[in-house]
């Protein structure tokens, strides 16, 4: 390939990577120097996009330890920084405007934004010192309020804690990704999800389907959510949320005490569980959570 052909090929590569057609009109460098300049431009462009690709691959657990070490060196990433990773999700794909808002909001040197896919953005926030639980929760609430105010769209946020080195990011990111999935199953209206606040949902989410079906068969007459009418389900949920208090539940449901007792008796006939008793109430709660989980499988 002649030097002229090399220059033309490099210009084509630049156009493919940037979408801009470059032309050499007034060049004081010779052809060899021009080739070197164009290669440096390509390398700079490649490095600019590859840093995000590297971080995306790191978060998704796609890189080997050697590749992680090489990427940290290549992109001059501070491996000793304290980082607070956050996963941001929309139910619909991010629009160009929403992506722009997120990038503008978190374009400071302390933050790094990585587009994971059409509906998920990772925010890596550098912090000067470890956060206690209260400070961590407040930061998340502030970020959510800012995002929803500026982008005018509802977003879900998931988080766990801070990491002290880049090689810890894949494990933490897997945890917060799973946290979002668990919240979708057991707390679909919840917009802020903390990995340490999943309760029974975290345990149930890891159970095999056959074990779940066996539990329902043994402890819940084999019933699933779709086998129970909405009024009965609502009564069960409100009664459990009322601390098994008949008076409190009746007040929330605007029912006479005797009407509620009649419903509770019907629930016992249907499920075999008297949810006025603590053990049966817990069995019922677990069964309903398992049924919700099976609906998502």
Image: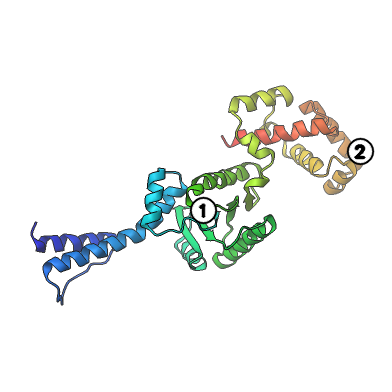
Q: Position of residue 137 (x, y in %)?
A: 66, 57
Residue 89 visible, this angle: no
- Tell me what residue is drawn at x 69 percent, y 58 percent: 134
- Tell me what residue is drawn at x 72 percent, y 39 percent: 230
**Above or below 108: residue 237:** above
- Tell me what residue is drawn at x 22 percent, y 62 percent: 39
Left or right of 242 on screen, residue 5: left
Q: Position of residue 153 (x, y in %)?
A: 57, 61
Left or right of 100 on screen, residue 10: left
**Above or below 111: residue 93:** above
Query: Mark 1 highlights which residue?
Result: 92
Query: Mark 2 highlights which residue?
Result: 258
Left or right of 218 on screen, residue 174: left
- Tell me what residue is drawn at x 48 percent, y 67 percent: 109
Between residue 219 and residue 59, name the one nearer to us.
59
Upstream in the sequence, badge 2 or badge 1? 1
Quadrant that contains the C terminus: top right
| Secondary structure of residue under mark 2 | helix
């Amino acid at each position: 390939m002649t030097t002229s052909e090399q220059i033309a090929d490099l210009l084509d590569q630049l156009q493919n990577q940037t979408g801009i057609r470059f032309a050499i009109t007034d060049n004081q460098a010779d052809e060899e120097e021009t080739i070197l300049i164009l290669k440096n431009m390509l390398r700079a462009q490649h490095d600019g996009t590859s840093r995000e690709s590297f971080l995306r691959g790191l978060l998704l657990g796609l890189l080997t330890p050697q590749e992680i070490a090489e990427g940290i060196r290549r992109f001059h990433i501070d491996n000793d920084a304290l980082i607070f990773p956050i996963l941001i999700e929309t139910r619909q794909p991010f629009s160009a405007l929403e992506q722009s808002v997120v990038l503008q909001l978190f374009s400071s040197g302390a933050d790094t934004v990585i587009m994971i896919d059409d509906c998920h953005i990772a925010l890596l926030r550098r912090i000067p010192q470890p956060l206690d639980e209260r400070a961590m929760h407040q930061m998340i609430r502030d970020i959510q309020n800012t995002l929803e105010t500026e982008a005018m769209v509802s977003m879900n946020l998931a988080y766990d804690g801070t990491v002290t080195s880049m090689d810890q990011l894949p494990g933490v990111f897997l945890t917060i990704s799973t946290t979002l999935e668990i919240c979708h199953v057991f707390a679909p209206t919840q917009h802020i999800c903390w990995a340490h606040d999943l309760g029974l949902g975290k345990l149930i989410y890891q159970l095999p389907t056959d074990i779940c079906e066996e539990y329902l068969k043994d402890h819940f007459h084999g019933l699933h959510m779709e086998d129970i009418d909405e009024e009965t389900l609502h009564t069960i949920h409100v009664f459990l949320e009322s601390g098994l208090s008949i008076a409190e539940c009746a007040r929330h449901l605007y029912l006479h005490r005797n009407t509620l007792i009649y419903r509770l008796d019907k629930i016992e006939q249907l499920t075999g569980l008297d949810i006025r008793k603590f053990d049966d109430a817990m069995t019922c709660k677990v069964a309903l959570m398992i049924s919700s989980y099976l609906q998502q499988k």
